[in-house]
Image (spheres, rainbow, N blue to C red):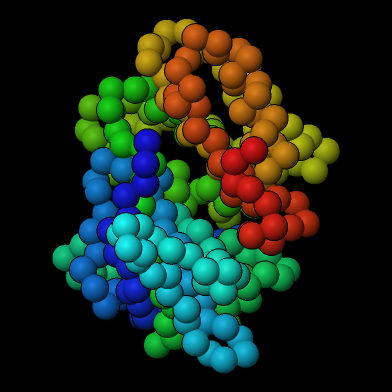
Amino acid sequence: MHEKKNIINASLTVVKIERPSESYWRLHFSCDKPLVVNPRWICPHLKLLFADPLTGEIAFPLLDENNKISVSDRVRQFARSYSIRDYDERNNHIVIDFAIHASGLATVWSQQAKVGDQVGFVGPAGKLEFANQYLILMGDVSALPAICYTLAHLPADHQAIAFIEVNHKTDIVDLPKHLSVKWMIKDANYPNQLVDTLMNWDFSQHDNLLFWGGLEGSLAQQLRHALKDKYVNLAPNAIQITSYWREGLAEGEFKHRD
């Protein structure tokens, strides 16, 4: 499954800033080019391109002679992946939640952002589309925006369940009552809470399973291996788990898939 890039060399301008919970800043952006998100994408994302702190310039990727995206080391240094929390195609607006950390390029930028500030971006993109699978969404607070977006855009007849571990009770959001969501509060004494909950859940009444997850790197790897060992008859692409972050490392210093 190949990602489909729709927009290159576009800019987002901050139009509104919120603090929906203890774990996030929520930024609303307007886009200077038509913004199209495939309604069948599961957990779509984009690449934000931040300005070089020394020059204030935003470096964009280019297209090579084969019409493929060419990304220089300079572009990659200031690029970060973010999930779409919400978007309004008619008004060309998009919403992104920034998880709050002690440091990091995107974290610092989001906490200092003001209305009128700009970032570049590439995307949106999606690796998965809704089909006829029973969708199992899994993630820690870093994946909450992607999971909430996907649950909000489920086709009316699509079956799904979500397992979400958040940092604080304030991170728990209201979702449609008919959706099945298992909320967990992070427990430092029980780091495998999310993995154990998934592995002990009974999915035997459902066919055609599709697992999607986003969480800390070591747990992502653990969960990926555990699911493959338990569900040996699933196709390889039926388990899609991404390392959204890795303890002690910034994006660019680790691989999203191991």
At a point 39% along the width and 61% down the height, the residue shown is 69
The quarter of the image holding the C terminus is top right
Q: Position of residue 116 (x, y in %)?
A: 40, 88
Asked whether, in this view, residue 150 is left or right of residue 53, the answer is: left
Judge whether residue 217 can be spotted in this image: yes
Q: Position of residue 35 (x, y in %)?
A: 25, 64
Q: Position of residue 10 (x, y in %)?
A: 33, 74
At a point 42% along the width and 82% down the height, the residue shown is 118
At a point 35% along the width and 66% down the height, the residue shown is 63
Hey, which quadrant is residue 55 in on the image? Answer: bottom right
| Above/below status of 33 relative to 37 | below
Q: Nearer the viewer, residue 97 or 81?
A: 81
Q: Residue furthest bottom?
A: 55
Q: Nearer the viewer, residue 3 or 186?
A: 3
Q: Nearer the viewer, residue 224 or 5?
A: 5
| Above/below status of 155 relative to 72 | above
Judge whether residue 197 can be spotted in this image: no
